[in-house]
Image (cartoon, rainbow, N blue to C red):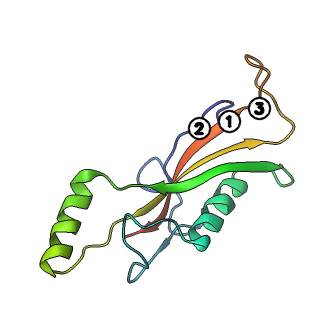
Amino acid sequence: MDSHTAARTAGADADAGVDGANGAEKRAPFPSHPLGPLSADEIARSSHLIAQEWPQGTSLLFKVVKLREPAKKELVPYLEAERAGGELAPIDRRSDVLYYIKNTVCFATGAPCMHSIILKLFTG
């Protein structure tokens, strides 16, 4: 992992291993609105996916785990269908996570090294 800021999506091309290896899974009916806050399960899944990427015993501190809002091009058709009472196409749920490894510091600043990552939690 990048020593300062890691950005990746746990899904698609650069994210080999989704739907199995890293824990992202297919969902049938989506549990919440695409703009709804992350559920406790989605927050737990986010921290679990990150912890899997580090050696066992690495002590992580999660500062922020929040919803990564879908792109406008995905969201607008969803909202239009919702208003019209039409069929709602599923939209992938993603989380933005900010964390650091306990008892480590960045050489440049002497402060804890924050890591930022985007995870795909569910495939629509």
Q: Residue under circle 3?
A: 112
Residue at image point 77% right, 19% down: 107
Q: Nearer the viewer, residue 62 or 24?
A: 62
Dot 3: element: loop
Q: Residue under circle 2?
A: 6
82 relative position to 61: left or right: left
Circles 3 and 1 in contact, beta carbons < 8 Å = yes
Label 2 to label 3: alpha-carbon separation: 14 Å
Label 1 to label 2: alpha-carbon separation: 9 Å
Q: Residue under circle 1?
A: 114
| Mark 1 burial class by Cα count in 10 Å: few <14, some 14-19, many 20+ | some
The N terminus: image quadrant: top right
Q: Nearer the viewer, residue 38 or 115?
A: 38
Which amino acid lies under the numbered mark 3 shown in the image of this protein?
Pro
Q: Nearer the viewer, residue 73 or 33?
A: 33
The quarter of the displayed image where residue 66 is located: bottom right
Q: Position of residue 79 (x, y in %)?
A: 21, 67
Circles 1 and 2 in contact, beta carbons < 8 Å = no
Residue at image point 40% right, 83% down: 28
Q: Position of residue 46 (x, y in %)?
A: 61, 60
Q: Position of residue 38 (x, y in %)?
A: 52, 66
| Mark 3 burial class by Cα count in 10 Å: few <14, some 14-19, many 20+ | some
Q: Nearer the viewer, mark 2 or mark 3?
A: 3
N-term-proximal mark, 1 vs 2: 2
Residue at image point 83% right, 33% down: 104
The C terminus: image quadrant: bottom left
